Image (cartoon, rainbow, N blue to C red):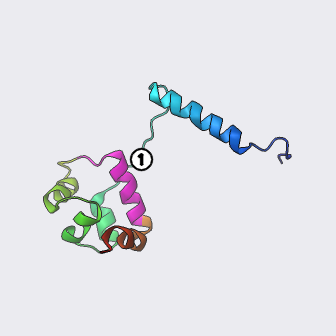
Amino acid sequence: MQTVAETPTFGDDLVQSLREALAHAKGDGPAIVHPAVSPRDVRQAINLTQAQMAPLVGMSLSGYRKWEQGARRVSGPAAALLQVIRKEPDAVKRALLAG
């Protein structure tokens, strides 16, 4: 168990974060790799059509279809969004589709 003196402070965390950011900017930091995500599996898990899913991820229907067909690669940020959609579909719908 850590004592009060051993508990990292906000300043310690901030310094460590800045070191990691600098290393990343120099190309030395670890790459963030998102697990492979199947857009089709996510869409089917939340019971949406392709036409309903495309605007949820900010894409045209044809672009979304290319994802599902494997003709277009799912980028890191998009993979992260798909993970969020899979876990919290209602929250994402409220946030992104609210008019």
Question: Element type at marker 1?
Answer: loop
Point out residue 19 in the picture as x, y percentages from the top left corner: 58, 30
Q: Which of 49 and 10 is in front in this view?
A: 10
Q: In this view, does 88 lie to the left or right of 72?
A: right
Q: Nearer the viewer, residue 28 or 48?
A: 28
Q: Pick the quarter of the image with the C terminus.
A: bottom left
Residue at 52%, 29% in the rendered image: 22
Identity, as a three-letter code, of the amino acid under mark 1: His
Point out residue 49 in the picture as x, y percentages from the top left corner: 22, 72
* Magenta stretch: helix, strand or loop mostly: helix
Residue at 24%, 65% in the rendered image: 55
Mark 1, other Cα within 10 Å: few <14 / some 14–19 / many ≥20? few
Which quarter of the figure has residue 85? Answer: bottom left
Magenta-colored span = 73-86
Find the residue positioned furthest to the left. 62
Name above or below for residue 87 compared with residue 14.
Answer: below
Task: Please name the residue that numbered disc 1 is placed on.
Answer: 34
Point out residue 25 in the picture as x, y percentages from the top left corner: 45, 29
